[in-house]
């Protein structure tokens, strides 16, 4: 018997209707707010292991039910409640807190989630394990196609096909789609204003590379690993364009050949990779970018849950800040028509807005200022 189940039994013997009330509470999120059963939650606090319970039918957890209360939220988190559990309606505690307008609890949850994800990400990078990150979004069962992981170890060894406005992999999942063109235009503008030396990782349909060419970059490097995509690049003349260097191979294998400080702008948009790969790529940026250089990436982090998306953006922001970047996200609107997804196995975008990352590598002077600033802050704290 688990500790949580044993605690539940003890609680049941102390408060005769405890189990019924807990079950009721777990099934009726409407008891939140003013009508929250304070006594019930008081009893729950005597049995911290209950934090890890979830109602088997609704999937609701005590953490989801306590989002009107910062104190209970903290209590459950401290006692092991998984911040990223989702109920049968695919909502996590953060979604319930945002929907209910409980900003203080949203902040507590974001803070907790960010710390958990940073620790996890760091542990995986330090161990140099190539296993996919047990990501914050991978909490759903694998049976539903929309819930399956989009990381695919065999992607590079299977064929892809160009099909009108999309590029599809062997499972008919979309590698790239035409609706992303306006987003690519924004990314291109961010990394290549003026005659800059730019890098794009992942050619796909060549949308961003074609747009970058209109900005007449001083030099344009493209990294692409898929043989079919590379064949298309060759056919379309990319290998002989003036000022363009195509590096065929996985970025992991060819990035070392890019000279230090040789780029003013970089964009990253691969496919079938995970957050660990993105973090690993980020670690190369301070070497290859010149100071003041601008970096951006396709921000498809956790694209089916706004709270998870927000946490993932925050994690990446902190990771890049630790690498001496200044990071902001610019919001833009994006409408994807339903017809666009015809012939595509699953949608990979669900929001009607998009946060464009703008990451600038601090100059030497700014680095110093930041350090002095930190020093002053430390002194004040003492
Ligand atoms: C989403 S598409 C890029 C779309 C591109 N931004 C555009 O505007 O058309 C991703 C591309 O990354 C490539 N790719 C995937 N993994 C890679 C890796 N490890 N190194 C280099 N390229 C990779 C894929 O073959 C694919 O062509």
Image (cartoon, helix red, strand yellow):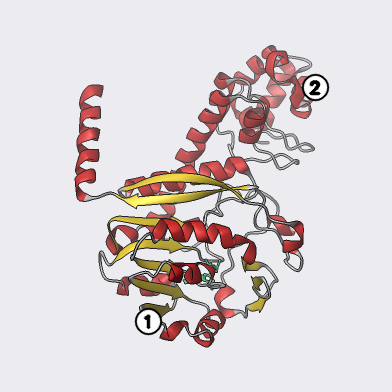
Image spot of residue 66 (x, y percent): 64, 24
Looking at the image, residue 247 sits to the left or right of residue 174; the answer is: left
Q: Name the residue under label 1.
A: 242
Please state the horizontal and vertical placement of residue 52, each as a whole percent of the image. Answer: 63, 34
For residue 347, side relative to residue 361 (left or right):
right
- Disc 2 + disc 1, Cβ < 8 Å: no
Q: Quadrant of the C terminus?
A: top left
Horizontal side of residue 380 vs 254, given as left or right: left
Question: In the rendered image, which quarter is residue 265 located in?
Answer: bottom left
Disc 1: CA contacts within 10 A as few (<14), some (14-19) or many (>=20): few
Report the residue at 63% width, 66% height from top. 178
* Disc number placed over residue 20 in the picture, else none: 2
Where on the picture, by quarter, is residue 177?
A: bottom right
Judge depth for marks 2 and 1 and give the one in front.
1
Picture coordinates of residue 172, whole percent (x, y): 70, 71
Q: Position of residue 164 (x, y in %)?
A: 68, 75
Q: Is residue 120 above or below residue 69?
A: below
Picture quarter containing residue 317?
top left
Q: Residue at x 56, y 21 (%)?
A: 70
Toward the viewer: 161 or 73?
A: 161
Residue in the image at 76% along x and 23% along y: 30
Q: Is mark 1 on a helix, strand or loop?
A: loop
């Amino acid at each position: 018997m688990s500790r949580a189940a044993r605690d539940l039994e003890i609680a049941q013997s102390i408060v005769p209707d405890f189990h019924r009330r807990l079950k009721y509470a777990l099934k009726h999120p409407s008891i939140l707010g003013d009508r929250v059963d304070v006594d019930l939650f008081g009893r729950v606090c005597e049995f911290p292991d209950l934090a890890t319970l979830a109602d088997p039918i609704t999937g609701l957890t005590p953490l989801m039910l306590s989002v009107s209360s910062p104190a209970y939220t903290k209590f459950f988190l401290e006692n092991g409640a998984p911040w990223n559990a989702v109920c049968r309606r695919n909502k996590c505690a953060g979604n319930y807190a945002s929907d209910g307008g409980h900003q203080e609890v949203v902040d507590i949850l974001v803070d907790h989630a960010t710390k958990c994800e940073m620790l996890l990400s760091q542990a995986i990078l330090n161990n140099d394990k190539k296993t996919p990150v047990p990501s914050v979004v991978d909490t759903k069962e694998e049976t539903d196609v929309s819930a399956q992981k989009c990381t695919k170890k065999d992607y590079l060894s299977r064929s892809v096909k160009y099909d009108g406005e999309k590029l599809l992999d062997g499972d008919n999942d979309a590698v790239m789609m035409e609706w992303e063109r306006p987003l690519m235009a924004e990314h291109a503008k961010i990394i290549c204003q003026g005659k800059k030396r730019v890098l794009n990782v992942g050619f796909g349909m060549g949308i961003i590379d074609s747009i970058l060419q209109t900005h007449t970059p001083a030099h344009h490097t493209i990294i692409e690993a898929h043989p079919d995509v590379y064949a298309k690049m060759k056919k379309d003349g990319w290998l002989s364009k003036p000022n363009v260097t195509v590096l065929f191979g996985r970025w992991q294998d060819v990035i070392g050949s890019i000279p230090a400080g040789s780029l003013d702008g970089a964009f990253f948009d691969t496919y079938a990779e995970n957050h660990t790969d993105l973090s690993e790529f980020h670690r190369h940026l301070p070497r290859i970018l010149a100071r003041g250089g601008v970096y951006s990436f396709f921000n498809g982090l956790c694209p089916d849950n706004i709270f998870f998306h927000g946490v993932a953006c925050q994690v990446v922001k902190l990771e890049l800040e630790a690498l001496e970047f200044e990071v902001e996200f610019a919001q833009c609107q994006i409408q994807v028509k339903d017809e666009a997804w015809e012939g595509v196995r699953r949608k990979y975008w669900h929001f009607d807005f998009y946060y464009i990352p703008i990451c600038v590598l601090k100059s030497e002077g700014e680095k110093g200022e930041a350090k002095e600033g930190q020093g002053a802050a430390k002194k004040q704290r003492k």
